Structures are given as C-alpha cells and as structure tokens.
Amino acid sequence: MNQPNWTEIIQAACSIITAPTVIITLLFTWRQIKLTAQQIRQASRQAERESEDRNRPYVSAQVVPSISGMGAWDLRIRNTGGTTAKEITIRLIKGEYIEGEGAHDSEIYNQMIALENTKFDLQPDTSLRIYWSFYSTNTGEVEVGAPLQGTIGITYRWRDESIDKLYRERVSYDCETPLIPVPSTGAERKGRNKGTTLINIEHTLRSISSSIGELNR
C-alpha cells in the first residue's frame, strides 16, 4: 500500500476546509437573493399603491349653507381624484328624513328618498350640489329633508379596462353645534326714490357676491 504524499494530504485538507466555506457562501447568496426578491415585491406593491393614490377617484360629501339663502342646507358632493367616480350612491345611514306636512314637502321628501336609489357618475375635479335640508328660520327646526346632524354613507367605483374597485366612505356632519356663517344680502327697501333704488342695487350686488362665494364652498 502506497503512503500518501504531502501534496495529496494538503489537497484533502483543503477540500475539507473548502466544503463548509462553499456551503456558507451558498447560504449567504441564497439569503441575499431572497432579500432582493422581497425588496422588489415591496417596491412593486408600493408603486402600485402610489399609482392607485394618484389615479383613483376620491368622492367627498359636505353639508354647507344653501346657495338659496337662509332656511336651507345643501349637500355638496365632490370628486377630487384623478379619474371618474362611477356608480356613486348617497345614503343617510344615521338619522331619518323628515317628510313634512304639505304637498310640496312630500315632493321634496320623495325626491330625497329616490336619490338613495339613484346611481350617478362624477368627473374628476367636479362637484354636484343638491338640497339637503329645509328648516324654519324662526325655530331652527327641520321642516322637510335630512336632520341637522347625521352620517352619510357614500359608495363609488373606480372602473377601467383592467380595474374594478369599490370604495366606501362615511361622513358625519353637524349643522347645529359649530357656528357656521351664512351670508346675508341685507334688507330690501320699498319705494321709488333715488336712495331706495341705490339701496336695492347694493342689495342685488351683495346677492351676486354671496352666490359666487357660495359656489366655491
């Protein structure tokens, strides 16, 4: 039997030493590949979320003083997103509509109930304004329409060639507690003299200014 020479011994020793090193290197490489794959997936999800945030519709609702003046509140529905909001629905989910007593009140009440069963679309950066509540300027009590405090439920869709997502929002409102300013056009005078005419012109200009201001609410 031949005795192994020193070269064979050294090669064998190197093989024994190298094997664990190769294994450790492979494990480290596998771990780095795994971490890189995770980072790529996270970056992809982040890019997808950012793309959705930029392009999706955002529908909001706000109860504001009516452009018709004292005695009414309007509901302003607005899309501030980057694409059209589809199949928007508006529902009063906390509180109840008040029907009123007269025939005109019943007509308003029926239209508000019909609104909850109506779907509509809203283009980006556009808004829709509808009557929401009518109240007595003497007592402050609601005569017909929605209560002065409540919660509105909104649903809408982002629908595109490869996208169909449903969004839900809840908006609470309170027209009683905050001190919300309501514009006034001032008094209107009766008569035909010059002073009365100038006062009425001023009244008209204030009315126009008030309406323009309310359109931007």
Image (cartoon, rainbow, N blue to C red):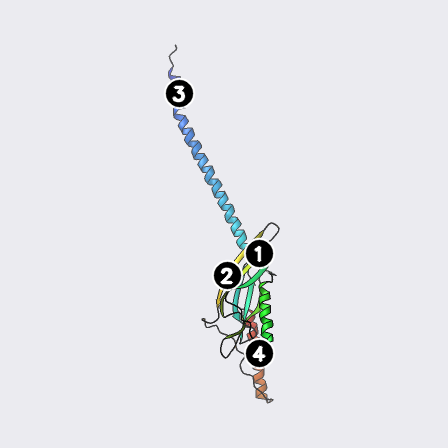
Q: Nearer the viewer, mark 1 or mark 3?
A: 1
Disc 4: CA contacts within 10 A as few (<14), some (14-19) or many (>=20)? few
Where in the figure is residue 116, as x and y percent of width and height? Answer: 57, 64
Residue 158 visible to an observer of this rendering:
yes
Q: What residue type is labelled 3?
A: Ala
Question: Which of marks 1 and 4 precedes in the sequence?
Answer: 1
**Camera-side residue: 73 or 92?**
92
Q: In this view, does 1 lie above or below 140?
A: above
Where in the figure is residue 201, as x and y percent of width and height? Answer: 58, 82
Q: What residue type is labelled 2?
A: Arg
Number of the label disc, if any, that sits on residue 205: 4
Question: Which of marks 3 and 2 precedes in the sequence?
Answer: 3
Q: Distance between the residues labelled 1 and 3?
A: 70 Å
Secondary structure under the numbered disc 2 in the rendered image: strand
Where in the figure is residue 169, as x and y percent of width and height? Answer: 51, 59
**Camera-side residue: 17 or 119?**
119
Secondary structure under the numbered disc 1 in the rendered image: strand
Disc 2: CA contacts within 10 A as few (<14), some (14-19) or many (>=20)? some
Q: What residue occupies the far right of the structure in this picture? A: 161
Q: Quadrant of residue 104?
A: bottom right
Residue corresponding to mark 3: 12
Q: Distance between the residues labelled 4 and 1?
A: 42 Å
Q: Nearer the viewer, mark 2 or mark 4?
A: 2
Residue corresponding to mark 1: 157
Q: Distance between the residues labelled 2 and 3?
A: 74 Å
Number of the label disc, if any, that sits on residue 170: 2
Q: Distance between the residues labelled 2 and 1?
A: 15 Å
Q: What residue type is labelled 1?
A: Arg
